[in-house]
Image (cartoon, grey):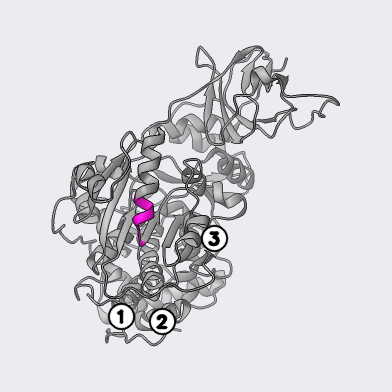
Amino acid sequence: MTALAGDYARALLTDIGAQSAQIAPFPAQHPAVSWALSGAMALTGWPDQPPRMCAAPLAACGDGVLLALTSISEHPLPAELTGSKLLGERAAIAGYGRQGAVSAGGSCRFLQAADGWIALNLARPEDWDMVPALIGRDIEHDWSLLSAAVRTLSADQMVAQGGDLGLPIAHHRFPGEGRPWFEIVREPPSTAPTHRAHRPLVVDLSSLWAGPLCGHLLHLIGARVIKVESASRPDGARQGPAAFFDLMNGGKESVALDFANTAGQAQLRGLVAQADIVIEGSRPRALRQLGIWAEDLVLEKPGLTWVGITGYGRTGDATDWVAYGDDAAVAAGLSALITGPDEAPIFCSDAIGDPLAGMHAALVAWHRWRSGAGGLVSIALHDIVSHCIAFGGPLMPASAADRRLTWQQVLDRQGVIAARPQARTAYCSARALGADNAAIFAEFDLPC
Amino acid sequence: MKTLKLGAKYRSAVCDTQIMVIRTVPEPLELCCGGAPMLGASDAAPEAAALDPAFADACLIGKRYINADDRIELLCTKGGKGALSLGLVKLKVKQAKALPSSD
């Protein structure tokens, strides 16, 4: 069973109701070859060992998403921009390499529990403050001490506790049934008139990678994008490599608001009221606490398309869980497609849930706006990875190992080796924080 | 009075508030919400408990609350009308930290 980018593009377009779109010809590349050439394979494995094959067609899926997006855009994406190559962009810029049971970015680690493995992501020194509550006792900020402490604890209990604590944590497992890749949470009863002639306004409220990538792609296909950040807690990626921040956010206008006071909240509401598309990357409760309810806004303004990107979705207990790309992928079972049950688990590529989610989010957001359907669309990192895994066909642990072998043989026969991750160069620098406040406040008559 | 356990959950006897212990001290404490002692998992709710209006400042989900010497820290896991206190002394909201630069 081979899973090709063109087929994935067709499947996605059918899922969103755009099955009549014409997909540009794309080489029928074996998913193993796509994986190797994407740069993601080089990011998977132990540093002192050869890179690893993954039994999920993730790179082919990445190519497929952007094929689908370009097929419904008046301004197609540049031909050299393929979804598979985006998977390794952050690592290429930041200089990350594969690190086995430590994520490429360095903040997420596999820890062995009494009854399995967990992946715990501690992206800030302050996240360590929550670890005593996770394990039920005081501990110094040291991964080897934590590893020893976790060894006697239950993985399920830690994941439940971590969920309550807002810690990104996942239980290493084999993939389950494939999830739908998006959910329409709320949509207006009737379609708005379609807006193909007008350039949509995207208000991008997101940070780090998934959401900003979505905004970046929408900008590339013609949208005007305003990136909105909290003045006191701006996008943390501003502290990371400038080249990556510029790549994701170059071309967007920048507004900084003070979310803590009523004036800032009114300005945020005013901007959101102008948007054709909103990208949200936080847990739903964050904006709700500021008086912004996406569920209501998409009904009040038919045609408004709101894409909410979370780790695990917007309903039930999961709505409060935090996830980043590495741990969400573990939760979807991805790491179990790289090593067998008798081997310690390792991470797959660099935070792979993020670029995959960002690309899928752009596809559904663009289509919902373009068709006038609008509505609140939920994109969950976990579900995106689960869906891409399922595209490769049904798997059991034994057949996953067989597929890894078979796919590696494809590479060997064709003489393909794992390419280094690559990144595009940003076409312009990102705007300084809040650089466009005055102009945008004036343009949209925002309350001061 | 009870000694709080790291990671343990307590619920309010007089409102919806639930918290989890992030940092604590070994000594027993009078952990209250809405003016009434909070309940552990195995504690039964008292019969006629009412929210004390002097402790009705509300507790917000996701916020962390600390005491004066910052040795006690509680995470609100479910919001409610009552204010958290140790005895009669209210806890205050801990300031939010910067978002991560990467994940």
Q: Which mark, by number, is residue A18?
A: 2
Foreground of the two, A227 or A126: A227
- Disc nearer the start of the sequence (3/2): 2
State the residue at coordinates (52%, 57%).
A295
Q: Position of residue A161 (x, y in %)?
A: 60, 40
Q: Is residue A85 left or right of residue A205?
A: left
Q: Nearer the viewer, mark 3 or mark 1?
A: 1
Whole-number angstrom distance, CA of label 3 to CA of label 2 = 40 Å
Disc 1 chain ID: A
Bounds of the magenta segment: A271-276
Chain to which mark 3 belongs: A
Q: Amino acid at mark 1?
A: Ser
- 1 and 2 marks in contact (CB < 8 Å): yes
Labels 1, 2: one chain: yes
Image quarter for residue A219?
Answer: bottom left
Marks 3 and 1: CB-CB under 8 Å?
A: no
In the figure, B19 relative to A83: above or below? Answer: above
**Residue occupied by mark 3:** A341
Mark positioned earlier in the residue sequence (3 or 1): 1
Q: Is residue A296 magenta?
A: no
Q: Residue at x 38, y 49 (%)?
A: A103
Q: Marks 3 and 1, Cα distance to the nearest angstrom?
A: 41 Å
Give the residue pinned by disc 1. Answer: A71
Give the amino acid at mark 3. Pro
| Residue A14 image point, x, y percent | 45, 82
